[in-house]
Image: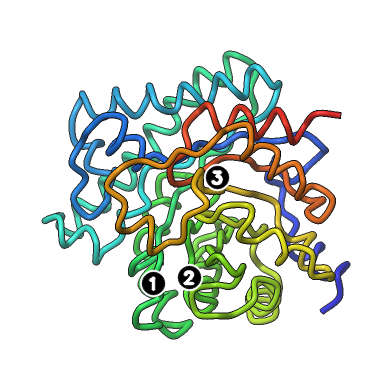
Amino acid sequence: MDLIDRETRGRTDLPQLRGQGVFVTDGGLETELVFHDGRELPAFAAFPLLDNVEGRARLRRYYRGYLDIAQAQRAGFVMETPTWRANPDWAAQLGYSAARLDEINRGAVALAREVCVDATAAGIGTVVSGCVGPRGDGYDPGAVMSHREAQDYHAIQIGSFAAAQADQVTAITMTTVAESIGVVRAAEVAGLPAAISLTVETDGRLPTGQPLHEAIDEVDAETGAAAAYFMVNCAHPTHFARAVEHPGGWRHRVAGLRANASAKSHAELDDATELDDGDPHDLAAQHRALREHLPAVRVLGGCCGTDARHVAAIVGAWTAD
Protein backbone atom coordinates (compact mmCIF):
# COMPACT_ATOMS: atom_id res chain seq x y z
CA MET A 1 0.00 0.00 0.00
CA ASP A 2 1.66 3.27 -1.07
CA LEU A 3 1.58 6.62 0.69
CA ILE A 4 -1.23 8.09 -1.42
CA ASP A 5 -3.46 5.07 -0.76
CA ARG A 6 -2.81 5.23 2.97
CA GLU A 7 -3.42 8.95 3.24
CA THR A 8 -6.66 8.58 1.31
CA ARG A 9 -7.96 5.70 3.44
CA GLY A 10 -6.89 7.29 6.71
CA ARG A 11 -8.42 10.67 5.92
CA THR A 12 -11.57 11.63 7.80
CA ASP A 13 -13.40 14.88 8.34
CA LEU A 14 -11.85 15.30 11.80
CA PRO A 15 -10.90 18.97 12.12
CA GLN A 16 -7.40 18.23 13.43
CA LEU A 17 -6.61 16.57 10.09
CA ARG A 18 -7.62 19.63 8.10
CA GLY A 19 -5.48 22.68 7.55
CA GLN A 20 -2.14 23.46 9.14
CA GLY A 21 -3.08 24.53 12.66
CA VAL A 22 -2.41 22.49 15.78
CA PHE A 23 -4.79 21.03 18.36
CA VAL A 24 -3.92 20.96 22.04
CA THR A 25 -4.78 17.96 24.18
CA ASP A 26 -4.12 17.34 27.86
CA GLY A 27 -1.12 16.02 29.77
CA GLY A 28 -0.55 13.46 32.50
CA LEU A 29 -3.92 13.36 34.23
CA GLU A 30 -3.18 10.41 36.49
CA THR A 31 0.28 11.60 37.57
CA GLU A 32 -1.11 15.06 38.27
CA LEU A 33 -3.83 13.61 40.49
CA VAL A 34 -1.38 11.37 42.35
CA PHE A 35 1.63 13.65 42.74
CA HIS A 36 0.10 17.15 42.66
CA ASP A 37 -3.15 16.40 44.50
CA GLY A 38 -1.93 13.54 46.68
CA ARG A 39 -4.90 11.39 45.67
CA GLU A 40 -5.01 7.64 45.88
CA LEU A 41 -5.79 6.16 42.45
CA PRO A 42 -6.41 2.42 42.77
CA ALA A 43 -5.45 0.70 39.51
CA PHE A 44 -4.15 4.12 38.39
CA ALA A 45 -7.72 4.88 37.32
CA ALA A 46 -9.03 8.44 37.04
CA PHE A 47 -12.54 7.58 35.90
CA PRO A 48 -13.95 7.10 39.45
CA LEU A 49 -13.77 10.91 39.78
CA LEU A 50 -16.83 10.95 37.54
CA ASP A 51 -18.81 9.35 40.37
CA ASN A 52 -19.16 12.50 42.46
CA VAL A 53 -19.60 16.27 42.22
CA GLU A 54 -16.16 17.08 43.69
CA GLY A 55 -14.42 14.71 41.31
CA ARG A 56 -16.16 16.12 38.25
CA ALA A 57 -15.31 19.66 39.38
CA ARG A 58 -11.64 18.67 39.70
CA LEU A 59 -11.68 17.25 36.17
CA ARG A 60 -13.19 20.45 34.79
CA ARG A 61 -10.43 22.50 36.44
CA TYR A 62 -7.83 20.15 35.00
CA TYR A 63 -9.10 20.49 31.44
CA ARG A 64 -9.55 24.25 31.84
CA GLY A 65 -5.78 24.63 31.99
CA TYR A 66 -5.40 23.08 28.55
CA LEU A 67 -8.28 25.07 27.09
CA ASP A 68 -6.41 28.19 28.20
CA ILE A 69 -3.39 27.02 26.19
CA ALA A 70 -5.52 26.41 23.12
CA GLN A 71 -7.07 29.85 23.43
CA ALA A 72 -3.68 31.55 23.90
CA GLN A 73 -2.24 29.72 20.89
CA ARG A 74 -5.36 30.12 18.76
CA ALA A 75 -5.37 26.35 18.47
CA GLY A 76 -8.03 23.68 18.56
CA PHE A 77 -8.64 21.30 21.46
CA VAL A 78 -8.99 17.51 21.56
CA MET A 79 -10.94 16.79 24.73
CA GLU A 80 -9.83 13.30 25.80
CA THR A 81 -12.19 11.62 28.28
CA PRO A 82 -10.66 10.44 31.60
CA THR A 83 -11.43 6.81 30.75
CA TRP A 84 -8.03 5.23 30.08
CA ARG A 85 -8.80 2.52 32.66
CA ALA A 86 -12.57 2.38 32.06
CA ASN A 87 -12.61 -0.97 30.27
CA PRO A 88 -14.11 -4.20 31.60
CA ASP A 89 -11.14 -5.91 33.28
CA TRP A 90 -9.84 -2.84 35.09
CA ALA A 91 -13.31 -1.66 36.06
CA ALA A 92 -14.15 -5.07 37.51
CA GLN A 93 -11.11 -4.79 39.78
CA LEU A 94 -12.62 -1.57 41.14
CA GLY A 95 -16.06 -3.11 41.68
CA TYR A 96 -17.89 -1.60 38.69
CA SER A 97 -20.60 -3.68 37.03
CA ALA A 98 -20.98 -3.77 33.27
CA ALA A 99 -24.03 -1.53 33.48
CA ARG A 100 -22.29 0.99 35.71
CA LEU A 101 -19.24 0.99 33.44
CA ASP A 102 -21.45 1.84 30.48
CA GLU A 103 -22.90 4.75 32.46
CA ILE A 104 -19.40 5.95 33.36
CA ASN A 105 -18.19 5.95 29.77
CA ARG A 106 -21.31 7.70 28.53
CA GLY A 107 -21.02 10.17 31.40
CA ALA A 108 -17.41 10.89 30.48
CA VAL A 109 -18.50 11.97 27.01
CA ALA A 110 -21.23 14.12 28.54
CA LEU A 111 -18.66 15.82 30.78
CA ALA A 112 -16.44 16.39 27.77
CA ARG A 113 -19.32 18.07 25.96
CA GLU A 114 -19.86 20.34 28.95
CA VAL A 115 -16.18 21.32 28.98
CA CYS A 116 -16.31 22.05 25.28
CA VAL A 117 -19.19 24.51 25.71
CA ASP A 118 -16.76 27.00 27.23
CA ALA A 119 -14.26 26.30 24.46
CA THR A 120 -16.81 26.92 21.74
CA ALA A 121 -17.83 30.18 23.39
CA ALA A 122 -14.18 31.23 23.30
CA GLY A 123 -13.94 30.41 19.60
CA ILE A 124 -11.94 27.20 20.07
CA GLY A 125 -12.63 24.30 17.72
CA THR A 126 -13.13 21.10 19.73
CA VAL A 127 -13.14 17.35 19.25
CA VAL A 128 -14.50 14.96 21.89
CA SER A 129 -12.43 11.79 21.98
CA GLY A 130 -13.33 8.68 23.94
CA CYS A 131 -10.09 7.48 25.53
CA VAL A 132 -9.43 3.74 25.30
CA GLY A 133 -6.63 2.18 27.32
CA PRO A 134 -4.94 -1.19 27.00
CA ARG A 135 -6.57 -4.27 28.45
CA GLY A 136 -3.39 -5.00 30.37
CA ASP A 137 -0.58 -2.89 31.73
CA GLY A 138 0.38 0.17 29.72
CA TYR A 139 4.07 -0.71 29.96
CA ASP A 140 3.92 -4.49 29.51
CA PRO A 141 2.04 -6.29 26.70
CA GLY A 142 1.48 -9.29 28.97
CA ALA A 143 -0.67 -11.99 27.35
CA VAL A 144 -1.13 -10.83 23.76
CA MET A 145 -4.70 -11.02 22.46
CA SER A 146 -5.60 -11.96 18.92
CA HIS A 147 -7.03 -9.27 16.64
CA ARG A 148 -10.50 -10.69 17.13
CA GLU A 149 -10.23 -10.95 20.92
CA ALA A 150 -9.08 -7.33 21.07
CA GLN A 151 -11.92 -6.21 18.82
CA ASP A 152 -14.54 -7.97 20.93
CA TYR A 153 -13.05 -6.69 24.18
CA HIS A 154 -12.75 -3.03 23.22
CA ALA A 155 -16.07 -2.98 21.36
CA ILE A 156 -17.80 -2.72 24.75
CA GLN A 157 -16.27 0.62 25.72
CA ILE A 158 -16.24 1.94 22.16
CA GLY A 159 -19.94 1.10 21.90
CA SER A 160 -20.62 3.31 24.92
CA PHE A 161 -18.69 6.16 23.32
CA ALA A 162 -20.60 5.77 20.06
CA ALA A 163 -23.94 5.74 21.90
CA ALA A 164 -22.94 8.96 23.65
CA GLN A 165 -21.96 10.50 20.30
CA ALA A 166 -18.24 10.99 20.81
CA ASP A 167 -16.46 12.38 17.75
CA GLN A 168 -13.72 9.75 17.76
CA VAL A 169 -11.85 7.27 19.94
CA THR A 170 -8.17 7.38 20.82
CA ALA A 171 -6.41 4.27 22.04
CA ILE A 172 -3.65 5.48 24.38
CA THR A 173 -0.50 3.54 25.34
CA MET A 174 -1.00 0.62 22.99
CA THR A 175 1.77 -1.94 23.44
CA THR A 176 0.95 -4.40 20.65
CA VAL A 177 -0.10 -4.38 17.03
CA ALA A 178 -2.82 -6.98 17.61
CA GLU A 179 -4.62 -4.87 20.21
CA SER A 180 -4.28 -1.79 18.01
CA ILE A 181 -5.85 -3.63 15.09
CA GLY A 182 -8.70 -4.76 17.31
CA VAL A 183 -9.43 -1.19 18.40
CA VAL A 184 -9.42 0.09 14.82
CA ARG A 185 -11.83 -2.64 13.73
CA ALA A 186 -14.15 -2.14 16.72
CA ALA A 187 -14.25 1.60 16.08
CA GLU A 188 -14.94 1.05 12.39
CA VAL A 189 -17.92 -1.17 13.25
CA ALA A 190 -19.16 1.50 15.68
CA GLY A 191 -18.83 4.20 13.04
CA LEU A 192 -16.17 6.23 14.88
CA PRO A 193 -12.75 7.37 13.61
CA ALA A 194 -9.92 5.85 15.63
CA ALA A 195 -6.52 7.25 16.53
CA ILE A 196 -3.92 4.73 17.71
CA SER A 197 -1.24 5.93 20.11
CA LEU A 198 1.64 3.51 20.50
CA THR A 199 4.16 3.52 23.32
CA VAL A 200 7.83 2.65 22.97
CA GLU A 201 10.72 1.77 25.22
CA THR A 202 13.99 3.72 25.45
CA ASP A 203 15.18 2.04 22.23
CA GLY A 204 12.25 3.39 20.21
CA ARG A 205 10.63 -0.04 19.88
CA LEU A 206 7.30 -1.23 21.19
CA PRO A 207 7.45 -3.29 24.41
CA THR A 208 7.16 -6.35 22.15
CA GLY A 209 10.45 -5.36 20.49
CA GLN A 210 8.83 -4.37 17.20
CA PRO A 211 10.16 -1.19 15.55
CA LEU A 212 7.72 1.72 15.53
CA HIS A 213 7.59 2.02 11.74
CA GLU A 214 6.89 -1.69 11.32
CA ALA A 215 4.06 -1.54 13.86
CA ILE A 216 2.33 1.33 12.08
CA ASP A 217 2.80 -0.29 8.69
CA GLU A 218 1.36 -3.57 10.00
CA VAL A 219 -1.72 -1.96 11.55
CA ASP A 220 -2.36 -0.14 8.27
CA ALA A 221 -1.83 -3.27 6.20
CA GLU A 222 -4.21 -5.35 8.34
CA THR A 223 -6.96 -2.70 8.49
CA GLY A 224 -6.73 -1.12 5.05
CA ALA A 225 -5.35 2.05 6.68
CA ALA A 226 -8.67 2.51 8.48
CA ALA A 227 -7.15 4.36 11.45
CA ALA A 228 -7.64 8.12 11.22
CA TYR A 229 -4.06 8.63 12.39
CA PHE A 230 -1.37 7.41 14.76
CA MET A 231 0.33 8.94 17.78
CA VAL A 232 3.23 8.17 20.12
CA ASN A 233 2.80 8.52 23.87
CA CYS A 234 4.26 7.60 27.26
CA ALA A 235 7.87 7.92 26.12
CA HIS A 236 10.35 10.77 26.22
CA PRO A 237 11.27 12.30 22.81
CA THR A 238 14.84 11.05 23.22
CA HIS A 239 13.46 7.51 23.27
CA PHE A 240 11.98 7.72 19.78
CA ALA A 241 14.01 10.47 18.09
CA ARG A 242 16.09 7.91 16.19
CA ALA A 243 13.03 5.81 15.38
CA VAL A 244 11.31 8.65 13.50
CA GLU A 245 14.35 9.10 11.29
CA HIS A 246 13.41 5.86 9.52
CA PRO A 247 12.16 6.90 6.07
CA GLY A 248 8.79 5.97 4.63
CA GLY A 249 5.18 6.99 4.29
CA TRP A 250 4.47 5.81 7.83
CA ARG A 251 5.79 9.11 9.16
CA HIS A 252 2.92 10.94 7.45
CA ARG A 253 0.49 8.82 9.46
CA VAL A 254 1.80 10.11 12.81
CA ALA A 255 -0.39 13.09 13.65
CA GLY A 256 0.04 13.37 17.42
CA LEU A 257 2.57 13.29 20.25
CA ARG A 258 1.98 12.87 23.98
CA ALA A 259 5.43 12.47 25.51
CA ASN A 260 6.55 11.87 29.08
CA ALA A 261 8.26 14.62 31.06
CA SER A 262 10.87 12.15 32.29
CA ALA A 263 13.55 10.40 30.25
CA LYS A 264 13.37 7.42 32.62
CA SER A 265 12.44 3.99 31.32
CA HIS A 266 9.01 2.48 31.94
CA ALA A 267 10.53 0.17 34.56
CA GLU A 268 12.08 3.12 36.39
CA LEU A 269 8.82 5.08 36.28
CA ASP A 270 6.95 2.07 37.65
CA ASP A 271 9.23 2.05 40.69
CA ALA A 272 9.27 5.83 41.19
CA THR A 273 7.88 7.21 44.44
CA GLU A 274 8.47 10.86 43.51
CA LEU A 275 7.43 12.80 40.43
CA ASP A 276 10.10 13.41 37.80
CA ASP A 277 8.63 16.34 35.88
CA GLY A 278 11.83 17.15 34.01
CA ASP A 279 12.36 20.56 32.41
CA PRO A 280 9.38 21.83 30.39
CA HIS A 281 11.56 23.99 28.13
CA ASP A 282 14.02 21.19 27.40
CA LEU A 283 11.09 18.88 26.66
CA ALA A 284 9.73 21.49 24.26
CA ALA A 285 13.10 21.78 22.51
CA GLN A 286 13.22 17.98 22.14
CA HIS A 287 9.81 18.14 20.44
CA ARG A 288 10.90 20.93 18.13
CA ALA A 289 13.78 18.75 16.92
CA LEU A 290 11.25 16.13 15.75
CA ARG A 291 9.36 18.47 13.40
CA GLU A 292 11.35 17.76 10.26
CA HIS A 293 10.72 14.02 10.56
CA LEU A 294 7.04 14.22 11.57
CA PRO A 295 5.42 16.70 9.17
CA ALA A 296 1.86 15.53 9.83
CA VAL A 297 1.76 16.14 13.60
CA ARG A 298 -1.21 18.31 14.54
CA VAL A 299 -2.15 17.09 18.05
CA LEU A 300 0.18 17.99 20.92
CA GLY A 301 -0.18 17.09 24.58
CA GLY A 302 1.69 15.21 27.27
CA CYS A 303 1.75 12.02 29.27
CA CYS A 304 3.31 10.92 32.57
CA GLY A 305 4.72 13.76 34.63
CA THR A 306 3.51 16.53 32.36
CA ASP A 307 1.05 19.28 33.20
CA ALA A 308 -0.13 22.47 31.56
CA ARG A 309 3.35 24.04 31.88
CA HIS A 310 4.88 21.35 29.71
CA VAL A 311 2.14 21.36 27.10
CA ALA A 312 2.23 25.15 26.79
CA ALA A 313 5.98 25.02 26.19
CA ILE A 314 5.65 22.17 23.68
CA VAL A 315 2.94 23.89 21.64
CA GLY A 316 4.85 27.16 21.70
CA ALA A 317 8.06 25.56 20.48
CA TRP A 318 6.33 23.46 17.82
CA THR A 319 4.48 26.38 16.30
CA ALA A 320 7.30 28.94 16.49
CA ASP A 321 8.65 30.12 13.12
Residue in view at x 70 percent, y 52 percent: 255
Q: What residue is pinned by disc 3?
A: 167
Left or right, 98 with respect to 230, comes to left
Residue in view at x 27 percent, y 49 percent: 45
- Observer-side mark, 1 or 2, equals 1
Q: In this view, does 130 lie above or below 310?
A: below
Where is residue 62 shown, x and y percent of the image? 40, 27
Disc with the residue nearer the chain's start (3 vs 1): 1
How much space separates mark 1 and mark 2, taking CA atoms?
Answer: 7 Å
Give the secondary structure at mark 3.
Answer: loop
Give the secondary structure at mark 2.
Answer: loop
Q: What residue is pinned by disc 2?
A: 175
How much space separates mark 2 and mark 3, taking CA atoms?
Answer: 24 Å
Q: What residue type is labelled 2?
A: Thr
How many residues crowd mark 2 within 10 Å: few (<14), some (14–19), many (20+)? many
> Which quadrant is the N terminus positioned in?
bottom right
Left or right, 9 with respect to 119, comes to right
Residue in view at x 64 percent, y 64 percent: 227
Q: What residue is pinned by disc 1?
A: 140
Front-most of 94 and 239?
A: 239
Q: Which amino acid does label 3 sit on?
A: Asp
Where is residue 189 shown, x and y percent of the image? 52, 67
Asked if labels 2 and 1 touch by Cβ distance under 8 angstroms, the answer is yes
Residue in view at x 21 percent, y 24 percent: 54
Quadrant in the picture for residue 218: bottom right
Where is residue 30 shown, x and y percent of the image? 34, 42
Q: Residue 165, which numbered label?
A: none
Q: Which residue lies furthest to the bottom in this view?
A: 146
Asked if labels 3 and 2 touch by Cβ distance under 8 angstroms, the answer is no
